Image: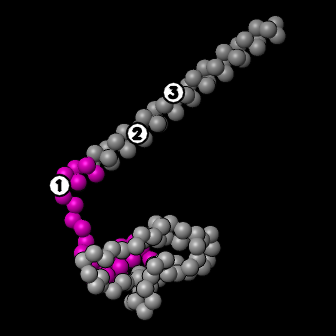
Amino acid sequence: MTVNRTLDQEGPATLTVFFTPPPRSSSATASSAPFSSTDPSTAPSGHASGAKIETIDMKHKHESEILSRLLELTKGMPYEASPDELAELRDVDDEKRQSERDREAQARLNEIKRQEKAVLDLARGGVEAA
């Protein structure tokens, strides 16, 4: 999959799906394409001319609607995560929440230290001025 990004937020937001004809032999492999690009060309390199091309308008569409349309076009099946994968996702979410709590606690601690330093600097400045 190649993602073409543009800075123009007013322009179209389309997902173009290029279907390749089935390989003629078992030794045929798909050519690799860069996963991200700023090149506005629509066809990936090595795309066979005459192959089926479908587009999905993604402008102001929810991700579930885009996915539904993509699955419909490609006759794809939604992937069901295994119990191990679900447990791993929960662990990652737990770690993110703990990291956020740790960041907030550290920020509070840094603020307290900054305030204490400011008070000490003010007290030192007051002694020197007297």
At a point 33% along the width and 48% down the height, the residue shown is 93
> Can residue 13 be spotted in the picture?
yes
Q: Are marks 3 and 1 in contact (CB under 8 Å)?
A: no
Where is residue 73, by image quadrant?
A: bottom left
Residue closer to the observer: 103 or 50? 50
User: Which residues make up the magenta segment?
Assistant: 60-89
The answer to if 44 sits in the magenta stretch is no
Mark 2 lies on residue:
99
Residue closer to the observer: 127 or 7? 7
Label annotation for residue 34 = none
Vertically, is 121 above or below 5? Answer: above
Residue closer to the observer: 53 or 11? 53
Mark 1 lies on residue:
83
Where is residue 99, by image quadrant?
A: top left
Q: Are marks 3 and 2 in contact (CB under 8 Å)?
A: no
At a point 58% along the width and 77% down the height, the residue shown is 40
> Can residue 68 be spotted in the picture?
no
Vertically, is 11 above or below 112? Answer: below
Q: Secondary structure at mark 1?
A: helix
Quadrant the N terminus occupies = bottom left
Q: Secondary structure at mark 3?
A: helix
